[in-house]
Image (cartoon, rainbow, N blue to C red):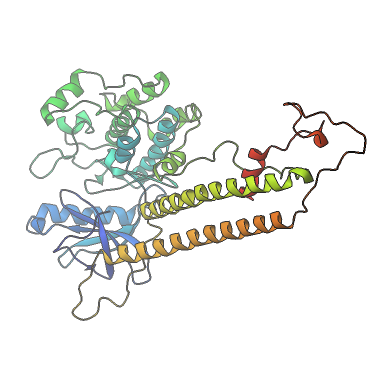
Amino acid sequence: MRPLLPGEPLRVGRYEIEGSLGSGGMGTVYLGRSPGGRPAAIKVISPDYLGHPEAVARFRREAEMLGAVRSAYTAGLIDCELDTPPYWMATEYIPGPTLSAAVEADGAMAPGACAEVMAALAEGLADIHRHGICHRDLKPQNVILSATGPQLIDFGLARGTGASGLTLTGIAMGTPGYIAPEMVESDRLTPAADVFALGATMAWAATGRRPYGHGSFQAIYLRLMREQIDLEGVDPRLAAVIRSCVARDPAARPSPDEIITQCRHLRSIDGITPTRLLSHLAGARPPQPGAGPHPPEAAAPVPARAADAARGSVAAAATRAGAVADRSTRMAGTVAGRARFAGAARPAPDRHGPASGDSASPASGGHDQRRVRTRRLLTVTGVVVAAVLIFTGGAFAAISLLPATEPTPPASGTVMDPPSSGDLWPDDAGEPLPDETDSAPRRAGR
């Protein structure tokens, strides 16, 4: 989401606009909030298209289609204004990256993840086809990978089953490489056209490449009619399902229900699901091996060595405390960054609107967030420093209370041999010295 630019609306209908989610050929989609705080995707038609009856009719038809479809794989229509300019519609806001953005960020998806996404999209297509609607513009940019599964968006080109696939000017609408060949050769629209687009979309997901390469509409269409879809390096079982979807003969393509059945056997290839993919994109990391409670405290050193061990522990504790403070600082910054990415730190908008004479400033919320993060960081650092001082003072107090040990004088008449280099402490013979380097970190980590 980008901040609002000068001239963009601060309010659409009853929705307060917080930022722009993206722009398309006919308008812009904003993130808005209702008076009660519910987020919504607000699509506003561009003023340049208000004078084009066909564009306005298409916008109204999209709202009608969304209002007619009730599916777990589509964003439902919440509100709209189709009588008085500027025309707009509000749909459910679905957080998450598009399939296109996910592949561009992480590369081609694994076969098991592709099968999961393909099965879900096929089920979504089956739902809208049962309502007598064809999407007509299925592509990676129109699929959102949400936390609950893939979602179909942008019904701007949707039409009823059996309707003409051409515009009033006789031009087939859609994205080159994802338009079924019959959409260019004839004007009859069938659900098989969406199946073709699904196959081309999953070819992009599995390879990270455009299914029929780059170029003009004519060049891509010629490759589509004369060459095979680009599936180099794709798992053979997944490639077979995709090839069946992009068959040139619409009658040879599988139905959405048949695609679901074929994908069911591919889902467990690598154990990767769309939810795990989203967790990776959000910056989540699996727990590190060996992480867990600290090991039990080492046994106390023998009395004769207590003073030396305590001194070593204090020095090691000071070193370890510095490292802990440094890690705490880095952790605070990392958590704040992830919260900002996920939108968790979004400040609540002022529901009463800006004060008289004031203008809404997109940066004001950022300053508030930075002040909050600074206060948290100072609090964490203060706690760490206080803990180090308390521990250090206690250790020195313990050292001062230890009784001094004096060597026992030899009995009269006894001749003592000087200690050898390997027997520096005759009174501790046979007992191992404590591991001072081990005891210090454990005390510091307590």
* Spot occupied by residue 151 in the image (x, y as percentages of width and height): 37, 46
* Spot occupied by residue 192 in the image (x, y as percentages of width and height): 30, 33
- The front one of 436 and 164 is 436
- Name which residue lies at 40% across and 46% down: 282
Please, is residue 439 above or below residue 265 in the view? below
- Name which residue lies at 35% across and 19% down: 233
**Image quadrant of residue 217?**
top left
* Spot occupied by residue 382 in the image (x, y as percentages of width and height): 50, 62
**Image quadrant of residue 347?**
bottom left
Q: Is residue 216 left or right of residue 441?
A: left
* Spot occupied by residue 316 in the image (x, y as percentages of width and height): 59, 45
- The front one of 190 and 108 is 108
- Name which residue lies at 82% across and 37% down: 427
Q: Is residue 432 left or right of residue 236?
A: right
User: Going by the picture, which residue comes out furthest to the front?
Assistant: 413
Q: Is residue 372 visible?
A: yes
**How many numbered circles are shown?**
0
- Name which residue lies at 71% across and 48% down: 307
Q: Is residue 134 visible?
A: no
- The front one of 30 and 176 is 30
Please, is residue 95 above or below residue 17 in the view? above
**Image quadrant of residue 195?**
top left
- The front one of 44 and 196 is 44
